[in-house]
Amino acid sequence: MLRRGASVGDDIVSRNQNRKVSRRSSGRPTIADVAKLAGVAAITVSRALRDPSLVSAELRAQIDTAVVQLGYAPDPNARALASSRADVIGVLVPSLTNIVFADTVRGIYDELGESPLQILMGNTHYSPREEERLVRMFLSQRPSALIVSGVDQTETTRKLLETAGCPVVQIMELGEDPVDMLVGFSHFEGGKTATNHLLEAGYRRIGFIGARMDPRSQRRLAGYRWAMEEARLFDPKLVTTTLTPSSMPLGGQLLADALAKAHDLDAVFCNNDDLAMGVLFECQRAAIAVPQRMGICGFNDLDMMRVAHPPLTSVRTPRYDIGRRSVQMVRDRLADRAVSPAIVDLGFELQIRESTMR
Amino acid sequence: MLRRGASVGDDIVSRNQNRKVSRRSSGRPTIADVAKLAGVAAITVSRALRDPSLVSAELRAQIDTAVVQLGYAPDPNARALASSRADVIGVLVPSLTNIVFADTVRGIYDELGESPLQILMGNTHYSPREEERLVRMFLSQRPSALIVSGVDQTETTRKLLETAGCPVVQIMELGEDPVDMLVGFSHFEGGKTATNHLLEAGYRRIGFIGARMDPRSQRRLAGYRWAMEEARLFDPKLVTTTLTPSSMPLGGQLLADALAKAHDLDAVFCNNDDLAMGVLFECQRAAIAVPQRMGICGFNDLDMMRVAHPPLTSVRTPRYDIGRRSVQMVRDRLADRAVSPAIVDLGFELQIRESTMR
DNA sequence: TTGTATGCGTTATCAT
DNA sequence: ATGATAACGCATACAA
């Protein structure tokens, strides 16, 4: 559609003169151009670029010169076609705005640094069906690796991943038998630990407030329930959940709902920090003293938790590190290094603050 | 590396029997397989898949059947190589965790829907140099379009974009002469409007608190300064900025810094909502009455602003819509429809709340 | 509307 | 260590 400038065009002409007529040239120097200029075969250039140790120092120097002189850059599509392998890592997350996954994705990008590996990102919107569609789509590109969120893939997706022919990392959660590799932490234990802390702080009518209720939220709820039942304090009235996506406004609403069901509620374990912050504001508005009349505990421990008034207790999760680690595992596997263990538990850490210090 | 299952393998064998030996086959059905099964030429399959109207209904049906029967999926790399055009849109943002860009990226993905266009995302980390590197990298893929953030590219990047040979959309800001297309809003006007509102509310010693101070922050500051100078109330002591990335904790710190410089500060226009929220908590902690002793205005108007205690005034920005619109503009251009105007101002809206109602 | 011949830019394979 | 040749899977150019 658009033509290049004259200087670049000249290169094309000189190149095409030697091949009768080439109507389809893209206008960029190819590996053949570099080869000709360096006085070697194309395949030698290819080798020199991929693994310099395969080529003698002398030719390597000539080739490097030619590459710079022509401003040659390999065509990733041609490379992928010829080698049946794209320098691409497919990443599937359920949400791009949820800070949890935003942090994880940032970790992935940061660990990649200036590597030539590209990220192909897919947003599943928490839908296993959409996840399946995206896995198919990504697989058609023969990616170097796949990173997927969670362990609750559909049966079909799981089979696709098992026969993908590339490293696969499931992230965010722990699980018994990963498709391939796995890095995350236990949401069940996270929920249990938070709840036990509230119990130890002296709260008794501890509620659970949850939004979205995706598989990981469910496991945190299960951890909460386990702890409450162990203390013989579980009461279904204490659980307030919705499928609505999480937000601060929703936190306030859910607290109101929870109080309507259980007037004697004296603490809440919130599914995430946004809800917790919404709960805090609702308490401020209703003049409910935190932590005296109401304990509040969040999940993820975003920065804001420590500056709230009062500062809010939360479970710190290794979101960023999960991203980085997943890429490291992919790298190790691609370099043919054994990855052990294939299941990595990055843990979590309860950050106790004023909001639960009764 | 990995071999496919037997059933698929059978297909390979039958396919390869007719071509002597093929050691490089990837094991997946190709367009030739579909063509053979449908009793047509490969090019006809190619056409039927890209634009069904080019092929007779009869053949189309045969081809569709064959496609389903073989489970054929086109190879995007082969397609890109042959057509010199990848079904890929390159997107460059300065940050993935900044909710502003996360929302924009979400808009981009949502507008794309189930389209076969893939997103290639790059994180420039607010570095024009890194942006330049990524533009080069993306361009080597011959993307269908490029979406870049802001209008402050390096000269080299700008030239690369101008000769990219594909639609280019600059997003988030307004500007005189875009590379190609542009969608955003005026950060200068946003800053000016917020400041004028604070002035009208009766505040006089209005401070500006800013973090990161990227080009867009600079323009908001310029808007603030313009309004203050117009009111003959500008005072350098009222401006408190840092290059540190924005966060809630930082908001509190900056307020403390600002108060140290100007004890009579009676309001702050914050560069973004995180800072504003940090300021609010700091006020709560120091028992500074909001909005009586201190007015607070943020920027972006995230959900949390309306549930804070008191609710916080902010400038609502069309982040999500910018993402959607940018893709629409790309689509229109790719469909050869004229895009007019090529510069789209999506505006902003001041949301006045209790935090500035003195 | 459909088909033939060929090119896209690179790498796998085999040979030297 | 280096090279010649033939794929990789699809789309363009042109012919019929």
Image (tube, coloured by chain):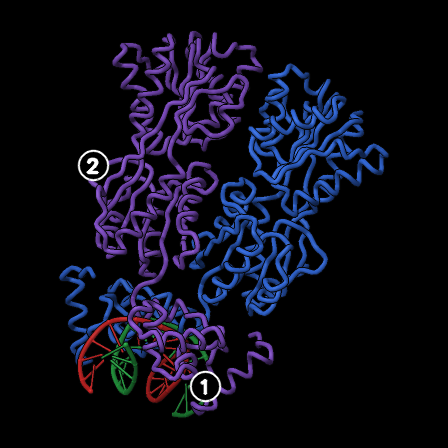
Chain colours: A purple, B blue, C red, D green
**B335 or A230, which is in the foreground?**
A230
Quarter of the rendering occupied by the C terminus of chain A: top left
Q: Residue furthest front?
A: A58
Residue B57 visible to an observer of this rendering:
no
Residue occupying the point 64% across, 26% down: B312
Kind of residue at disc 1: Ser
Residue occupying the point 51% across, 83% down: A12
> Horizontal and vertical percent for residue B76?
37, 65
Tag of residue B173: none
- Name above or below for residue B210 compared with residue B288: below
Residue B252 visible to an observer of this rendering:
yes
- Name above or below for residue A81 compared with residue A339: below
Mark 1 Cα shell of 10 Å, populated few (<14), some (14-19), many (≥20): few
> Horizontal and vertical percent for residue A215?
32, 33
Instruction: Compute the Cα span from label 2 to label 1.
Output: 57 Å
Residue occupying the point 23% across, 70% down: B25
Left or right side of A347 for B164: right
Q: Is disc 1 placed on a helix, strand or loop?
A: loop
Q: Quadrant of residue B234?
A: top right
Q: Earlier in the sequence, mark 2 or mark 1?
A: 1
- Name above or below for residue A124 compared with residue B259: below
Kind of residue at disc 2: Glu
**Disc 1: which residue:** A22
> Horizontal and vertical percent for residue A227?
29, 17
- Name above or below for residue A85 compared with residue A292: below
Quarter of the rendering occupied by the N terminus of chain A: bottom right
- Label 1 marks which chain's residue? A
**Disc 2: which residue:** A176
